[in-house]
Each structure stands twice: as C-alpha cells, then as structure tokens.
Amino acid sequence: QVQLVESGGGLVQAGGSLRLSCAASGRTFSSYDMGWFRQTPGKEREFVAGISWSGARTYDADSVKGRFTISRDNAKNTVYLQMNSLKPEDTALYYCAARMRGPSIVTSRGPYDYWGQGTQVTVSS
C-alpha cells in the first residue's frame, strides 16, 4: 500500500513557475514508477510526465515538453514536478500516481495503482 500526498499548488501568473511535490508513505518507494496527471472539469485526466523507479528514465507529454521537469528523490520518498513558463491552459487539478516498476513509462492512467488527492494549479492571464 502506498499513500500519496501532493503539495505546492497555487495561483500564479502566466509565465511564472511552481514546483509540485508528492510525498509517498512506505519503505518501497523506489519500487514504483511515478507519474503526474492533471484534470479539468468535464475533461479526461491526462498524463503530464512520468519517471522510472530509479529516475533514469523520464517522459513528458508534448504539451509540457521543455517547460516541465519531473524528478524524484528516493531517499525522501518524494517526486517533484517543476513547472516553468506556465500558461493559463495549464490550470488544472494535478495528481501524482504510482505503479509497480515496469520496462517503460506508462502514459495511460489505468495501470497506476495509487493516487493522491490532487493539488490545484491556477494560472492567470
């Protein structure tokens, strides 16, 4: 069982930056690939970025490539999402998710077993 708690969301102007954190419980954090997803009302939850259990592999959605960076610190049981050059269309509820490590980073939500409650990011124009 893994419990995930996101933090770091807030209100920021377009062009600004935020860093989201996701703290995981348990001693086996390094066994899990991690992902960040986001969702706006009436839309499907969409993949933002993923990172392998060791941090060696990452993958970003095209919509955030070059602006967002995912990273993790296994000693702190934490995964991060650094968000730069934010745009109003980045406004969403951001979730972190965990799945047992696999051969590649998964971009669909189904295979992720554990989810946090989400943290709101609002970007004003």
Image (cartoon, grey):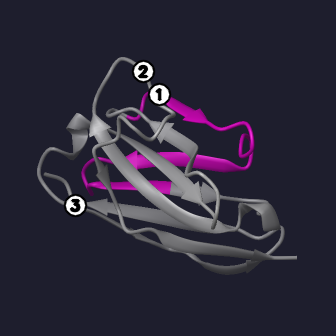
Q: Residue at x 55, y 52 (%)?
A: 45
Give the percent coordinates (x, y) of residue 10: 60, 80
Return the residue at label 2: 104
Q: Residue at x 49, y 39 (%)?
A: 50
Instruction: Name the residue at the top extreme.
Output: 103
Q: Residue at x 30, y 38 (%)?
A: 99
Q: Secondary structure at mark 3?
A: loop
Mark 2 vs mark 3, CA separation in Å: 22 Å
Whether residue 47 sits left or right of residue 100 in the image: it is right
Query: What is the three-letter code of the residue carrying label 2?
Result: Ser
Q: Is residue 116 above or below residue 67?
A: below
Return the residue at label 3: 3
Q: Quadrant of the C terminus?
A: bottom right
- Label annotation for residue 57: 1
Instruction: Name the residue at the right extreme.
Output: 125
Give the percent coordinates (x, y) of residue 79: 40, 53
Q: Is residue 37 magenta?
A: no
Give the percent coordinates (x, y) of residue 7: 44, 73
Dot 1 or dot 2, earlier in sequence: 1
Q: Is residue 120 above or below residue 114?
A: below
Q: Which residues are magenta?
A: 55-80
Mark 1–mark 2 CB contact (< 8 Å): yes
Dot 2 or dot 3, earlier in sequence: 3
Residue 117 visible in the shown view:
yes
Q: Secondary structure at mark 2?
A: loop
| Circle 3 Cα neighbour tier, 10 Å, few/some/many (<14 / 14–19 / ≥20) | some
Whether residue 83 sits left or right of residue 85 in the image: it is left
Whether residue 59 sits left or right of residue 105 in the image: it is right
Q: Is residue 96 above or below residue 11?
A: above
Dot 1 or dot 3, earlier in sequence: 3
Query: What is the three-letter code of the residue carrying label 1?
Result: Arg
Query: What is the three-letter code of the residue carrying label 3?
Result: Gln
